[in-house]
Amino acid sequence: GAVVSQHPSRVICKSGTSVKIECRSLDFQATTMFWYRQFPKQSLMLMATSNEGSKATYEQGVEKDKFLINHASLTLSTLTVTSAHPEDSSFYICSARTLLAGGNSYEQYFGPGTRLTVT
Amino acid sequence: AQKVTQAQTEISVVEKEDVTLDCVYETRDTTYYLFWYKQPPSGELVFLIRRNSFDEQNEISGRYSWNFQKSTSSFNFTITASQVVDSAVYFCALSDPTLPGTYKYIFGTGTRLKVLA
């Protein structure tokens, strides 16, 4: 199946700094990528939908100025957590969507996740 | 609005027991997909199954089986002869695959399965 990678897999940063997480589709082009956040022992919550070449669409309650998303190419989307605080510590998962043969439906593949710890 | 309910927060079974994880969904769409994912302690989501809303046939894959019933809006997952390696959090998810603007995965809250040796 298709592969989505995330880098880094784990990151520790100090409060007030910014951290960038990369999401890459390795063997397919993804016109749309999604960013999820998962707090410990909780479900995945969609943060934003990122379309290549356009601004991301954020879910209600997600601060777009804090979580900057860039989808500059069909294989790469980045999430930058700006001025990170301890409450931003979480597991961030991206997924990439591709159009299936036939052009009538899509498939979505998940990355392995990035564990962010803000100290 | 779409919603997925996994009422079982945590289940503990003894190895070799069968266990069923429940999933109830809500949607007004007639075309949708249902999924099950496994999330081991490493955190990576492991895809288990995708089921189209028009296909109500039950499916079996090794020790795993799924029961999809549109009449009760349920998509339950059964593990037969459970093993310790099955210990993980299992998520049920719902999505509408045909409308780009609304193609989102709605995840349930997950069921944590502990299989004891």
Image (cartoon, helix red, strand yellow):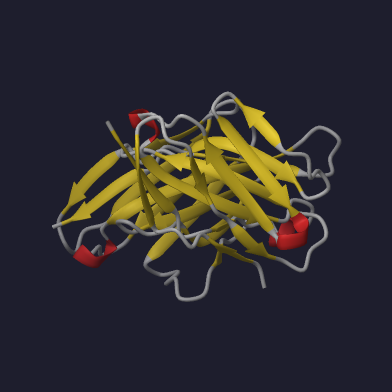
Give the x, y percent position of residue A64. 45, 69
Q: Residue at the location (79% across, 63% down)?
A: B29
Task: Give the vertical position of B43 relative to A101 (above or below).
Answer: below
Give the x, y percent position of residue A27. 59, 25
> Quarter of the image holding residue A63?
bottom left
Q: Is residue A52 visible?
A: no
From the viewer's side, name the closer residue of A77 and B2: B2
Task: Give the vertical position of B9 relative to A102 (above or below).
Answer: below
From the viewer's side, name the closer residue of A78 and B3: B3
Left or right of A86 on screen, residue B76: right
Q: Quarter holding the C terminus of chain A?
A: bottom left
Give the x, y percent position of residue B89. 40, 46
Left or right of A76 on screen, residue A79: left
Task: Give the vertical position of A44 relative to B86 (above or below).
Answer: below
> Quarter of the image holding residue B27?
bottom right
> Quarter of the image holding residue B74?
bottom right
